[in-house]
Amino acid sequence: MMQQLLILSGKGGTGKTTVAGALIQLCQSRAYADCDVDAPNLHLVAPRLSEPEKTAYYGFKKALIDASRCTRCGQCEQNCRFAAISGFAVDEFACEGCGVCAAICPAQAITMQDHIAGEQMLYQGDGKVFSTARLKMGSGAPGKLITAVKQRLMREAPECGLAIIDGSPGIGCPVIASVAGVDLVLIVAEPTISGIHDLKRIIDTAAYLDVQCAVCVNKFDINLPHTEQIKAYCHELRIPVIGLIPFDETVIRAVNNCHSIADYPDSPAGQAMIAIWENLRRLFIG
């Protein structure tokens, strides 16, 4: 049975994708996914696979006005709570798909149509599967798309080993969809005031969904007092801190060259990632 490891951070820019890319390589994962559907970038540092199979993703339905049947009574525009109708035309970016306009139109000139809100991509090759997606700008329902990304990974991937999932930033619907069904959440924290605040919120979210957490601190040496504060908070909640990654300019060079930090095992950050993977293995075995 495949186990799922989800990498979260609570905010963008903490090194979540860098850690995910390194773990994919260190554990030689045959199944991985990028659930940051607003700005997916795991493909930049993950193992290269073949060209993806692309599938349209349909989100919320959108209203469409049939000009040949419209009597221009204006009731749709008057009753739209999202100001999505103007000049007897629908703004697809403003329309939330509630269907009020279609329900009240006396001429039945408005229908709710399927709307392409994004694109799913599935990469396969060399016995590996990589599932990801990209949401169109202004489209909603990211949680639904993330669930589809994970379902496709589990359906297409080999049923053994460990799946690595690069989650969404934040703590809202996309994160909840990412956490659902995983075996362990690895939180990548940074030693800053905002980083500590977001760490606590992610821990609360995972606890509410009854999913175990572990923590690693990225660039731990830029603020040692805050690093100690993170360690103390995790100790109080009995959450393991499985690694401390130092600030290392090698990471910048690796990312700029679309490489994983695991490709630089002798670097300080590379050594830290190897230690994190060993600690994760012990957690999963335990």
Image (cartoon, helix red, strand yellow):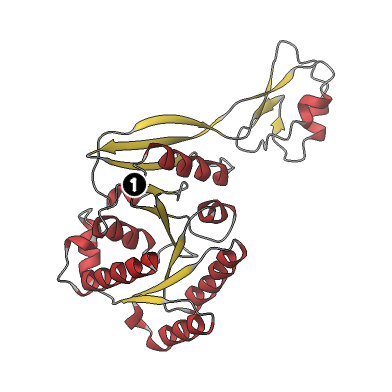
112 sits left or right of 259 in the view? right
Residue at point 47%, 59% (across, down): 183
Q: Quadrant of residue 142?
A: top right
With 124 as the anchor, is 172 left or right in this view? right
Residue 8 percent coordinates (x, y) = 45, 62
Q: Nearer the viewer, residue 107 or 227?
A: 227
Q: Is residue 23 left or right of residue 76?
A: left
User: Residue, x 24% and y 69% (percent of image)?
Assistant: 274
Residue 224, image x and y in percent? 37, 87
Residue nearer the viewer, 85 or 201? 201
Q: Which residue is located at x 50 percent, y 77 percent?
A: 196
| Residue 131 on image: x %, y % | 38, 42
Query: Mark 1 highlights which residue?
Result: 31
* Label 1 Cα neighbours within 10 Å, binned few <14 / some 14-19 / many ≥20: many
Instruction: Decide: is 245 above or below 60.
Output: below
Give the residue furthest to the top: 68
